[in-house]
């Protein structure tokens, strides 16, 4: 988490005397130029994020079609009731949550595990950091292609490896029971690097003296990890968890490229469902309603986590 | 600052920040000047990539893709003055989504391929240019030069929007060696026509006796299109329709549907003549290996069997029910997406390209498709092309997917019906339950307000 320097508070006595401190003066002077520097970003942000989001909210109350101009007929809450009553919508929500459940724990635990290992390396440390972080810089299409080849039936690397061990390989991307798991494995390999780097940074902030003191007191390595490392990584873990959950809820690329919604829609995530109804079926008004509902879900998750962090900070 | 250069160089950095920024700016400027002809530059400056080019999108991969590349090369050779930018996109929904959005965004290709059943939705969404008779006549493509059924199926209010290049029906592949042993071939080595439900069951039993495994295979698992095609063929032979009124009404005839589904269940579950859990590649493999003597599939699979060098031939899908022969089919067509401004030269270039593709119908027909271009379809060259010409009559007996915004090749409609039919063949649901399932899911789709 970034730390901000505390603003110098106005001396109440001085204020009562009507004197302004130099700090306040500086604030007023920097106000306008600061706005000037922020203007380009605010303009783009407003034009491409805020305005479309508001327009989408308005669209969700109409039968807006992608191929017809204007907003279409007024629908009131019918789009919302259709979404809430649609089995496909709820299944897409469930698939998204299931994907989040499948990917978040491994991405936190494995990232910590590899960060601990990489931290211990004395020689070639740069190589291990590169090796774990490198997949993260790949574009999603490249990652998808790599894993499509790995998952290819009969000819793929995974199939031949599993066959060598003597087991029958499942149809990784073609079996409804396995498709989501396969996507989760590919995602863990791809995005581990980011959490790994966050954990590395967190590990480096822990003072060496604590470990030395613990070693003098006779603590073994596992005890040191449990009693020193993990508690002091609390903030980092919270950050990683929040970012990971939100990123997993927004999953789209892997499903779109690797399974197109999967064998019999078993890997269709919420965003893919919104894409299907909005852009393929042209029903953009209904898609806006579905995406607003999804936004409320993500908002609820984020709010929950924020409350958790506030409680943690108060206690810790 | 005064002083000899070498002293200055020793005192400051070799490359100052200003020099670096200045150099970078000059480099970007030069790239911008040169970049107007690159794709990125053309996109930013909103100019045409290379004036006088035809932008062409298609969705042909695999064997069809190879043939299309050949035809594209043929066009470039015949018309060197017209450049060609051809792009192949993923088959199915991704292709149509991209085509629609490009047209809505005002940057469509000059000409694109579209299934006839999907072109109907694009027409309803006002995304295609109308093809005026005078423009078509100027390029030698009047309506009379096309297969009547395919041409008429693409008309909306009497206006033409799509130029068909082929009709690709469901056909019957048969292993000539196995059928000979089963005594099903005529004296000239072709399969004796199978007419009637009992005759088909009989033939399948004879084949199963020879193979010891199955009579026929087709894709069922993770494949909704194949069961749909078979169901549609038999159901339409009984005279049934599934949707009416642009897809807003479900007119499924329960009795006829039950006849077809019970018959399919007899073949797969009761008599074991069809493996109920084969997926598309599995069904193809079983036929290649000789575990079945018959194979129901689209004619495009001919390349696979030719490459496998197996003894096979093709003929019309059997006439199982009813008096009039029909069979499920779709057509590939060329469409011209609607452009923000009308450009006669661009239109002419696009139509020249289409004409060139039609002139190369021989290459396309070798991939198994029935040509709709009559000058070639009626020629001796096509007649001599076997086994492709064996089922040419299917073009005149083609029944297309019912009209509807959610219908068409690879659409949700096919998914709903095809999955249920496949489940019946796999023995997972009864015909009655399947019909109820189809009805309820189609009612949902039909009740949704059409976005076009």
Image: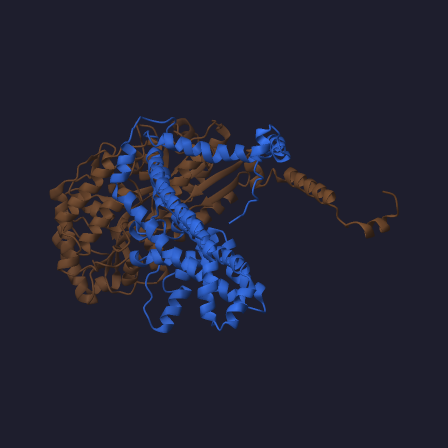
Front-most of residues B350 and A142: A142
- What is chain B's hue in the picture? brown
Is B225 left or right of B362, judged from the image as shown?
Answer: left
Residue B31 visible somewhere in the drawing: yes
Task: Give the number of marks.
Answer: 0
**Occupied quadrant, residue B309:** bottom left
The residue located at (37%, 58%) in the rendering is A182
The residue located at (20%, 53%) in the rendering is B423
Front-most of residues B233 and B37: B37
Is A307 left or right of A216, judged from the image as shown?
Answer: left
Percent across and percent down for residue B416 are: 24, 45
The colour scheme is by chain
Front-most of residues A177 and A17: A17
The residue located at (11%, 43%) in the rendering is B255
Front-most of residues B7 and B32: B7
The vertical placement of B387 against B158, above or below, is below
Percent across and percent down for residue B203 are: 16, 58
The vertical placement of B127 against B179, above or below, is above
Residue B404 visible somewhere in the drawing: no
The vertical placement of A142 against A16, above or below, is below
Percent across and percent down for residue B133 are: 38, 28
The chain that appears blue in the image is A
Percent across and percent down for residue A223 are: 45, 69
Is B427 left or right of A57, judged from the image as shown?
Answer: left
**Occupied quadrant, residue B28:** top right
């Amino acid at each position: 988490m970034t730390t901000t320097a505390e603003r110098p508070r106005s001396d109440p006595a001085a204020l009562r005397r009507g004197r302004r401190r130099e700090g306040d003066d500086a604030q007023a002077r920097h106000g306008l130029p600061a706005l000037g520097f922020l203007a380009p970003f605010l303009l783009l942000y407003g034009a491409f994020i805020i305005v479309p989001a508001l327009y989408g909210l308005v669209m969700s109350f109409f039968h807006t079609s992608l191929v017809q101009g204007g907003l279409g007929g007024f629908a009131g809450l019918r789009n919302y009731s259709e979404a809430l009553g649609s089995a496909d919508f709820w299944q897409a929500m469930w698939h998204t949550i299931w994907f989040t459940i499948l990917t978040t724990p491994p991405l936190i635990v494995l990232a910590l595990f590899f960060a601990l290992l990489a931290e211990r390396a004395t020689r070639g440390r740069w190589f291990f950091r590169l090796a774990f972080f490198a997949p993260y810089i790949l574009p999603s299409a490249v990652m998808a292609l790599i894993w499509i080849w790995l998952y290819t039936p009969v000819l793929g690397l995974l199939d031949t490896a599993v066959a060598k061990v003597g087991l029958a390989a499942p149809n990784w991307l073609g079996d409804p029971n396995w498709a989501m798991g396969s996507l989760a494995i590919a995602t863990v390999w791809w995005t581990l690097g980011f959490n790994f780097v966050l954990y590395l940074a967190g590990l480096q902030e822990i003072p060496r003296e604590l470990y030395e003191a613990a070693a003098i007191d006779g603590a073994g390595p596992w005890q040191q990890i449990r009693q020193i490392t993990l508690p002091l990584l609390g903030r980092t873990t919270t950050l990683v968890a929040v970012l990971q959950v939100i990123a997993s809820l927004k999953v789209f690329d892997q499903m779109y490229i690797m399974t197109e919604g999967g064998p019999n829609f078993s890997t269709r995530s919420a965003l893919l469902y919104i894409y299907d109804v909005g852009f393929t079926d042209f029903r953009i008004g209904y898609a806006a309603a579905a995406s607003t509902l999804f936004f409320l879900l993500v908002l609820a998750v984020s709010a929950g986590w924020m409350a958790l962090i506030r409680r943690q900070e108060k206690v810790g | 600052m005064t002083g000899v250069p070498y002293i200055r160089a020793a005192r400051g950095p070799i490359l100052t920040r200003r020099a670096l920024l200045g150099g970078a700016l000059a480099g970007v400027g030069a790239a911008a000047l040169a970049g107007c002809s690159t794709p990125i530059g053309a996109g930013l400056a909103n100019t045409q990539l290379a004036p006088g080019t035809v932008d062409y999108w298609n969705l042909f991969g695999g064997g069809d893709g190879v043939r299309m590349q050949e035809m594209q090369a043929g066009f470039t050779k015949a018309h060197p003055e017209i450049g060609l930018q051809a792009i192949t996109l993923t088959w199915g929904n991704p292709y149509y989504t991209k085509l629609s959005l490009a047209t809505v965004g005002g940057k469509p290709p000059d000409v694109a391929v579209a299934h006839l059943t999907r072109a109907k939705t694009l027409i309803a969404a006002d995304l295609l240019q109308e093809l005026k008779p005078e423009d078509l006549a100027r390029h030698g493509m009047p309506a009379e030069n096309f297969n009547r059924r395919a041409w008429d199926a693409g008309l909306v209010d009497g206006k033409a929007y799509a130029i068909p290049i082929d009709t690709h029906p469901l056909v019957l592949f048969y292993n000539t060696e196995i059928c000979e042993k089963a005594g099903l071939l005529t004296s000239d080595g072709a399969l004796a026509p199978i007419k009637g439900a009992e005759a088909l069951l009989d033939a399948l039993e004879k084949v199963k006796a020879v193979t010891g495994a199955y009579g026929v295979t087709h894709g069922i698992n993770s494949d909704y299109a194949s069961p749909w095609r078979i169901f549609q063929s038999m159901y339409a032979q009984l005279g049934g329709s599934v949707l009416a009124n642009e897809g807003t009404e479900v007119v499924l005839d329960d009795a006829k549907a039950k006849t077809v589904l019970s018959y399919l269940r007899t073949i797969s579950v009761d008599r074991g003549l069809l493996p109920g859990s084969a997926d598309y590649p599995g069904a193809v493999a079983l036929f290649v290996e000789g575990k079945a003597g018959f194979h129901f599939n689209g004619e495009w699979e001919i390349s696979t069997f030719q490459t496998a060098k197996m003894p096979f031939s093709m003929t019309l899908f059997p006439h199982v029910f009813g008096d009039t022969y029909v069979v499920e089919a779709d057509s590939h067509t060329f469409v011209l997406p609607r452009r923000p401004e009308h450009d006669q030269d661009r239109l002419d270039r696009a139509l020249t390209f289409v004409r060139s593709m039609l002139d190369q119908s021989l290459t396309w027909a070798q991939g198994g498709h029935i040509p709709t271009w009559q000058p070639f379809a009626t020629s001796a060259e096509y007649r001599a092309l076997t086994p492709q010409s064996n089922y040419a009559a299917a073009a005149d007996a083609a029944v297309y997917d019912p009209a509807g915004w959610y219908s068409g090749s690879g659409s949700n409609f096919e998914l709903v019906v095809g999955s249920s039919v496949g489940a019946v063949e796999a023995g997972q649901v009864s015909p009655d339950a399947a019909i109820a399932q189809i009805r309820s899911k189609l009612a949902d789709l039909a009740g949704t307000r059409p976005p076009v």
